[in-house]
Image (cartoon, helix red, strand yellow):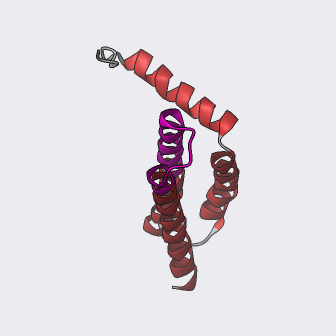
Amino acid sequence: MQNKPKYHLFKNTKYALDGLITAIKTESSFKLELFCAIFIIAGIIYIDTSLTNKLILLITGILVLIVELLNSAVENVVDLCTKEIHPLAKNAKDIGSTAVMFTIGLHTVCWVLILLF
């Protein structure tokens, strides 16, 4: 059995938007990061720095949201596969969280370096 529908631009866009809406409704970490993104974007617009630096901050900020969405997807798949506490399930969730942490750290380091130099 293949659970892969035929590609269709509008249907695939709807699937992506459904995923975004689900993440906003159900993922508290994503909601918090999306809320913070409002202030981050305002800060990017406000600071006096080059366009390149602003793009670095914008890209790393969006990267945080992307990695959080991927982490949420991993967590959902793990929860679908097992409700038991299993070392591999824990590892998968912890590794996804580490990816989010590293991305937030990267974004923070970019802010610090751009503001200091």
Residue in the foreground of this view, choosing between 28 and 57: 28
Horizontal side of 35 relative to 14 (left or right) equals right
> Is residue 29 shown above or below 22?
below
Quadrant for the N terminus, please: top left
Name the residue: 51% across, 80% down. 113
> Is residue 23 shown above or below 85?
above
Please provide the residue range marked out in magenta: 68-91
> Is residue 36 shown above or below 102?
above
> Is residue 69 shown above or below 54?
above
- Please identify the dominant SS of the magenta region: helix
Q: Position of residue 111 (x, y in %)?
A: 56, 73
Q: Position of residue 17 (x, y in %)?
A: 53, 27
Residue in the foreground of this view, choosing between 31 and 50: 31
**Quarter-wise, where is residue 84 in the image?**
top right
Name the residue: 42% across, 16% down. 10
Q: Is residue 88 magenta?
A: yes
Name the residue: 47% across, 35% down. 81
Name the residue: 56% across, 79% down. 112
Residue 110 at least partly seen: yes
Q: Position of residue 93 (x, y in %)?
A: 51, 52
Residue in the foreground of this view, choosing between 61 and 56: 61
Horizontal side of 66 relative to 30 (left or right) equals left
Residue in the foreground of this view, choosing between 94 and 14: 94
Q: Is residue 45 magenta?
A: no
Residue 49 at least partly seen: no
Q: Position of residue 48 (x, y in %)?
A: 59, 72
Q: Give the total number of marks visible in the rendering.
A: 0
